[in-house]
Image (cartoon, rainbow, N blue to C red):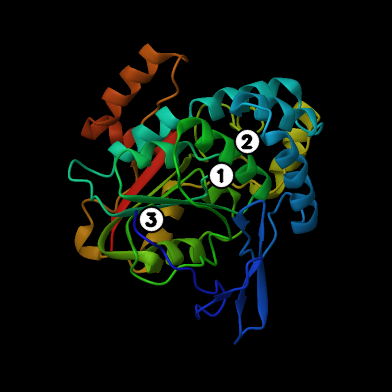
């Protein structure tokens, strides 16, 4: 397995390791290793403070030796009462299917996938990390949510996959430039206040010629908003969305901003991706790949999404978007 060295996420300088933390002398910052996971966060998760996230992660870690991955999901939602049971079941089904979903995302990288290292930014519980471990020499998963990385470590253990999981911000990645043969970021940008720095960071750490793949839920989809299970959220002005969700579902809707095709293309250009790859660096409808749910409908949709006329139409109102870039 390739060895990936960490750098300071803030100044990009070298780090020293003292058995409990990585230290940056120029910045004077200390990045602890908690439950075997290096924590390089500069900013907290938008849903929870760094301290509360670590506390929740430690509680999950106590359960990790005696629970399966599915059991960890059940336990997580049992200690997360602000997620209604119906949504918790929906999220758990999706999490259990993330290896198959990750396989579908990796297919979008193209037929000639590199054999080097892959970085999955916003890896959540590591489904794509497991899928990528079958194709790449080295895989690293990064997520800002420490608690989900603790759950993800159980998934990797069950799958027999040895891959580092790293807690860090997508806007401040703790890796040197030009390192990864491929970078993926699925279901990430809708959780960022400003995705532009994350696009730039993904490009920075990608090796020359590397594939960099983003996918996300479409703001203007005709299907229900996936985080709230409410219709029509993205069609409203963003300042109205939280009030609308609260009115319809009686639950909070915060720190989620679904994105449009125009926004993805703008961030791609601003990050400096090669304009000579315009045929590839174009937003397309992302394939649907949730096993056991409307598989025939998904198959028909995926077929239509590959047809030029339908593809242009589905970019406007299909459920998911993707963009493949080359550095």
Q: Which residue is mark 2?
A: 233
Q: CA distance from mark 3 to mark 1?
A: 14 Å
Judge whether 304 appears above or below 192 on screen: above
The residue depicted at 67 percent of the width and 34 percent of the height is: 65
Badge 3 element: helix
Instruction: Say which label, 3 or 2, has the lower sequence index.
Output: 2
Q: Let me know if residue 231 appears in the view.
A: no
Badge 2 element: helix
Left or right: residue 35 versus residue 6 is right
Q: Which residue is mark 1?
A: 258
Q: How many marks?
A: 3
Quadrant holding the C terminus: bottom left
Q: Within 10 angstroms of label 2, few (less than 14), some, or many (20 or more) residues?
A: many
Q: Residue furthest bottom?
A: 26
Marks 1 and 2: CB-CB under 8 Å? yes
Mark number displayed over residue 265: 3
Q: Which image quadrant for residue 183? A: bottom left
Q: Which image quadrant for residue 2? A: bottom left
Mark number displayed over residue 210: none
Judge by depth and name the residue closer to the eye, 304 or 197: 197
Left or right: residue 319 versus residue 92 is left
- How far across and how far down the image is residue 209, in percent? 23, 62
- How far across and how far down the image is residue 137, in percent? 30, 49
Q: CA distance from mark 1 to mark 2?
A: 9 Å
Badge 1 element: loop
């Amino acid at each position: 397995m390739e060895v990936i060295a960490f750098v300071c996420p803030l100044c990009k300088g070298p780090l020293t390791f003292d058995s409990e933390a990585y230290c940056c002398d120029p910045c004077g910052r200390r990045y602890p290793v908690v439950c075997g996971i290096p924590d390089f966060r500069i900013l907290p998760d938008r849903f929870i403070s760094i301290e509360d996230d670590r506390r929740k992660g430690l509680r999950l870690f106590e359960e990790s030796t005696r629970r399966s991955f599915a059991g960890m999901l059940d336990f997580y939602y049992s200690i997360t009462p602000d997620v209604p049971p119906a949504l918790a079941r929906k999220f758990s089904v999706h999490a259990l299917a993330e290896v198959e979903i990750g396989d579908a995302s990796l297919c979008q990288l193209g037929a000639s996938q590199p054999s080097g290292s892959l970085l999955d930014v916003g890896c959540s519980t590591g489904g794509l990390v497991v899928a990528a471990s079958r194709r790449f020499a080295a895989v690293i998963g990064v997520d800002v949510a420490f608690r989900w990385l603790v759950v993800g470590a159980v998934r990797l253990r069950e799958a027999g996959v040895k891959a580092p999981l790293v807690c860090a911000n997508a806007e401040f990645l703790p890796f040197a430039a030009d390192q990864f043969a491929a970078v993926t970021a699925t279901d990430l940008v809708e959780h960022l206040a400003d995705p532009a720095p994350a696009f730039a960071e993904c490009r920075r750490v990608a090796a020359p010629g590397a594939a960099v793949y983003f996918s996300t839920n479409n703001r203007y989809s005709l299907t229900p908003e996936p985080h709230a299970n409410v219709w029509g959220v993205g069609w409203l002005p963003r300042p109205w969305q939280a009030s609308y969700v609260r009115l319809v579902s009686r639950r909070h809707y915060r720190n989620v901003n679904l994105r449009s095709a125009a926004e993805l293309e703008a961030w791609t250009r601003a990050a400096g991706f090669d304009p000579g790859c315009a045929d590839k660096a174009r937003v397309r409808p992302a394939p649907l790949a949730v096993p056991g749910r409307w598989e025939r409908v998904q198959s028909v949709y995926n077929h239509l999404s590959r047809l030029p006329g339908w593809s242009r139409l589905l970019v406007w109102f299909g459920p998911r978007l993707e963009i493949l870039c080359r550095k």
